[in-house]
Amino acid sequence: MVRAAAYVPAASFEGVRVAAFDEDAFTLGATAAERAWVDRDRPSDPLVVHLVGEFPPVADWGFPVLLGRGTAEMVRHPGDASELARVVSTVEQGGEGPALVVAADLPERAAGGAGSPPSSFGAGAVALLFDSSTKSNPSRYEPATQDRSAVALALRVGRKGQDRVRKEAWMGDWDVAPAAGRRIDMEQTLRGANRDLSAVSEGAYVPRARYFENLPSRWLFTADECGECHEVTFPSRDSCRRCGRRDTLAPTSLPRDDVQVVAVTTIGRGGQPTEFDAQVQAAGPYQVALVEVASGIRITLQVTDAAAGELRVGDRVNTRLRRLYPMEGEWRYGRKAVPRSAGDALSRSS
């Protein structure tokens, strides 16, 4: 195993970590996968992604896009602890790589009604990166009686620190306390999450083809750098914004984490674009931040995991892939700004 990454949502309800209104199994897994895929650039290697859990259809094409791959072999598995142990053992013994195992647990939001906490350990995701070219001790993911999900098993193993010598291999939220999260109104969260995807959007229409065309910029903050005048153009538009050259462009990645807020505003009821009507009705006002990701390049992002008015100019934030709004019968996804937290550290603190 090269790296293990965990993501636990910032919100909690009744002492249990729960997903926010704009999170689903795909976005949970996406955050864990991005943490595990740090500084990897092996486009020539075939990639196998094992999905352990109930992921929405977007995961089949979304993970290859998120990892900067044109294609990847996607394999789905049930989301229980014994299946994660079996998948990890199979990958380690197979001698092929790289392989990414992503497990996500999203307990039924409405289980027992809005006033009851989820029945399992809570929401979260883990991503385990394997590569046959890297030698390491075999992972010991034997499920115990208390492990009811793959994520619960992986978090238990991670907390024990089975590889304390290589602390840089452990990233993210391994040691967060379930009850220490940001308390949320579960009823509001349910109203915001359980949207009718068949409804016709009243907002600005973005054709599905255009949405897919812009995903490298929307999801990865991919820009074009001109080899002639060295101007960086974002979002990518197939021509340099300064000199207009097309034949000298090369893709470059802009920072997605630890970026600075240069302006922020709160969108109150009635001021939101119509595609966010349901969100505002469910959760109230939200913030929009202008962040500087590179010199002269600024991006406008909706703020999540924070109360309206909480974010200030000068704060540093990370960005996460989240659900935006439904259109054409499916959720559209994009980057949002989130406050930096202890779980954003590049390696374990213990």
Image (cartoon, grey):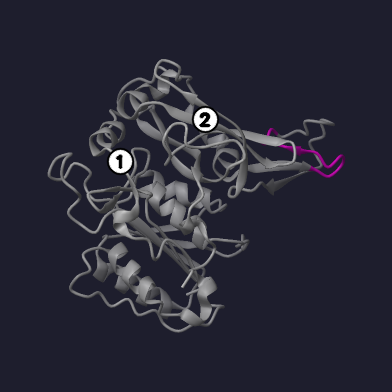
Q: Earlier in the sequence, mark 1 or mark 2?
A: 1
Q: Nearer the viewer, residue 15 or 297?
A: 15
* Image coords of residue 92 (percent x, y): 42, 77
Give me the residue at 37% from left, 57% from top. Answer: 125
Alpha carbon distance from label 1 to label 2: 20 Å
Quadrant of the image occupied by residue 103: bottom left
Disc 2 marks a residue whose amino acid type is Val
* Image coords of residue 346 (percent x, y): 54, 63
Magenta residues span 226-237
Outermost right residue: 228
What main secondary structure does the magenta stretch of the protein show?
A: loop
Give me the residue at 37% from left, 61% from top. Answer: 176
The image shows residue 151, relative to residue 237, as above or below, that is below
Give me the residue at 37% from left, 55% from top. Answer: 8
Q: Are marks 1 and 2 in contact (CB under 8 Å)?
A: no
Q: Which mark is residue 13?
A: none
The residue that mark 1 highlights is: 184
